[in-house]
Image (cartoon, grey):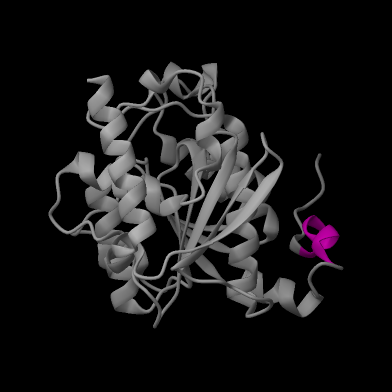
Amino acid sequence: MPPAFSYPLAFVRNLGWVTPAEQGILRSKRIAIAGMGGVGGVHLLTLTRLGIGAFHIADFDRFDLANFNRQVGATVTTLDLPKVDVLATLARDINPELQLALFRDGVHHGNMPAFLDGVDLYVDGLDFFAFGARQAVFAACAERGIPAITAAPLGMGTALLNFLPGGMSFDDYFGWGDLPEAEKALRFLVGLAPAGLHGSYLVDPASINLEAQRGPSTIMGCELCAGAAATEALKILLQRGPVAAAPFGYQFDAYHNRMVRTWRPGGYRNPLQQLAMWVIRRRRGARS
């Protein structure tokens, strides 16, 4: 018979990087994650191993073969199973005492109050092209004073932005409004990673089609996202260490072994952002 679960013993190796008192604080925290796919699933498992005690998790999708290259819950035995249920099982196998609230129809205006109720932090795990849901969640976080993190898996790296209470909002940084989805995708891509470190080793530009909402991905990018986001989560929740908020961000690319800190005052209005978007539009126009 396996030994009884013990939270202090299960997470004892965190100590040294955090104090026992800080580990207790992490245990008391509640994090919301929308999306249990590429980044969302690995966010949940990483934060569970950090010792976070409660989560609200949302996803309406089921696993299929196209998820196998990057999604930690995607296996032959989980094909066609709900992502949120699979990830909940995996997380509870790490910490049986975990408090989990499952939102099986995803996150939307109807369940937003419950999804964010009592939440200390939101970590974005939505699909890149889930514009409506992402816009709604970040706006609700800003309204409620909930810090929010988005980390995008770009190529073989990650680009991360924090949106903190009282600081620049997601909507002000990206300026989505009621724009067409292709324009939202462009602003999101350029805004997440102004340094564009991933672009130089894209071997097939045709694999990215913003209008068709299609793009390539790697497990390396997803796992780097989770490590970066969990570290920012630790600093935010423990109020320890510097936390740079938008319009500051950073991109780390493992392929190039480079990290670049970015600063785009004005967000999408910044002249450098405007120039980058103009160049991409020109290139797309030349290929069409």
The boundaries of the magenta stretch are 8-15
Q: Nearer the viewer, residue 218 or 141?
A: 218
Relative vertical location of residue 55 with respect to residue 213 in this rendering, above or below: below
- Residue 236 occupies quadrant: bottom right
> As drawn, is 136 to the left or to the right of 14?
left
Is residue 89 found left or right of 137 in the rendered image? right
Does residue 161 show up?
yes
Residue at left 54%, top 31%? 200
| Position of residue 116 measured from the top left corner of the image (x, y, whole percent) | 35, 67
Confirm whether residue 130 shows in the render: no
> What residue do we see at 22% from left, 39% from top?
182
Percent position of residue 85, x then y: 44, 39
Name the spot of residue 187 as percent of width and height, x first: 30, 49
Residue at the image position 33 percent from the left and 77 percent from the top: 144
Residue occupying image coordinates x 49% and y 36%: 38
Q: Is residue 125 above or below residue 248?
A: above
Q: Is residue 93 magenta?
A: no
From the image, which quarter does the N terminus lie in?
A: top right
Where is residue 14, by image quadrant? bottom right
The foreground one among 47 and 149 is: 149
Q: Could you say which quadrant of the image residue 242 lies in?
A: bottom right
Q: Is residue 249 above or below residue 107?
A: below
Please name the predominant secondary structure of the magenta segment in the image: helix
